[in-house]
Amino acid sequence: MNFTLKIWRQKNPTEKGKLVTYAVTNIPPDASFLEVLDVLNTDLVRKGEEPVAFDHDCREGICGSCGIMIEGRAHGPNRKAATCELRMRSFPDGDTLTVEPWRARPFPVIKDLVVDRTAFDRIMQAGGYVSVKTGQAPDANAIPVPKHHAEEAMDAAACIGCGACVATCPNGSAMLFVAAKVSQFALLPQGHAERKERVERMLAQMDKEGFGACSNTYACEAECPKQISVEHIARLNREFVRAKAL
Ligand code: SF4
């Protein structure tokens, strides 16, 4: 398969970026989108040109590193897939694809397609943890957890922190990410000790980082590669009201 890629090139956070057109040829239909960037970069390096910078790690859809806007869609057109899981057979042969970094003020561009997502780390540091008691591990059944709570917590824990929800939200809101993390702990007894402080601190940090508010467009859920439900945002709001009332 052959493609024309219009890729955002930006040398550093301060310099102005622009779309640069590249042709990639003889791409196997089963190649992932990141493998196409690998092919392009091999070619650029061979020609003595600067390769395209992009984030990647596990290439199995579980690390959350590979956030790229493809044709205006976070992680491309496929549902339930991160960019590394997107196969080129998803596009017509000969297609022209516009490839850009996440666009959100709290995620400044570092270089080309790489953005700074440490705002998410700071939100997690504000309260996205359970205090650890050292010592022997308790028996697995020492703290009973209702099955539906365990399953819902597991669904929330599937969030990989990729930031597609922010990139796709017209308000640049991080509510789905924060909701998934708050939900994950609120549903489990181990998370109850810091329940009040967690939601207050994580939301305060989210605001401090400059993320927008949620206006219920549901775009985040539609583009989330892990299909995190907006129902978790409802739980986040309930947790916040509960924290304020207690
Ligand atoms: S909620 Fe979904 S889109 Fe947002 S960071 Fe988590 S996995 Fe990515």
Image (cartoon, rainbow, N blue to C red):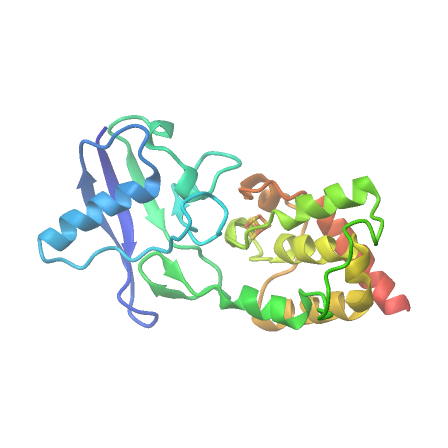
Q: Nearer the viewer, residue 8 or 180?
A: 180
Quarter where residue 177 is shown:
bottom right
Does residue 239 sit above or below 152 in this rendering? below
Q: Is residue 190 left or right of residue 49?
A: right
Q: Is residue 189 left or right of residue 78?
A: right
Residue that lies at the very extreme toward the right in this rendered image: 246
Q: Nearer the viewer, residue 92 or 89?
A: 89
Count of numbered marks? 0
Q: Nearer the viewer, residue 197 or 233?
A: 197
Q: Residue 52 location, x and y as percent?
A: 25, 55
Q: Measuring 79% from the left and 45% from the top, which residue is drawn there?
A: 149
Q: Residue 96 location, x and y as percent?
A: 28, 36
Q: Is residue 92 left or right of residue 115?
A: left
Q: Quadrant of the N terminus?
A: top left
Quarter where residue 15 is shown:
bottom left
Q: Quadrant of the C terminus?
A: bottom right
Does residue 138 sit above or below 200 in this rendering? above
Q: Measuring 27% from the left and 41% from the top, which residue is drawn there?
A: 36
Does residue 96 sit above or below 129 in this rendering? above
Whether residue 72 is visible here, answered yes or no, is no
Q: Residue 181 location, x and y as percent?
A: 67, 57
Q: Residue 7 location, x and y as percent?
A: 28, 49
Residue that lies at the very extreme toward the front in this rendered image: 136
Q: Measuring 37% from the left and 56% from the top, which residue is drawn there?
A: 55
Residue that lies at the very extreme toward the left in this rendered image: 47
Whether residue 243 is visible here, answered yes or no, is yes
Q: Is residue 108 left or right of residue 129?
A: left
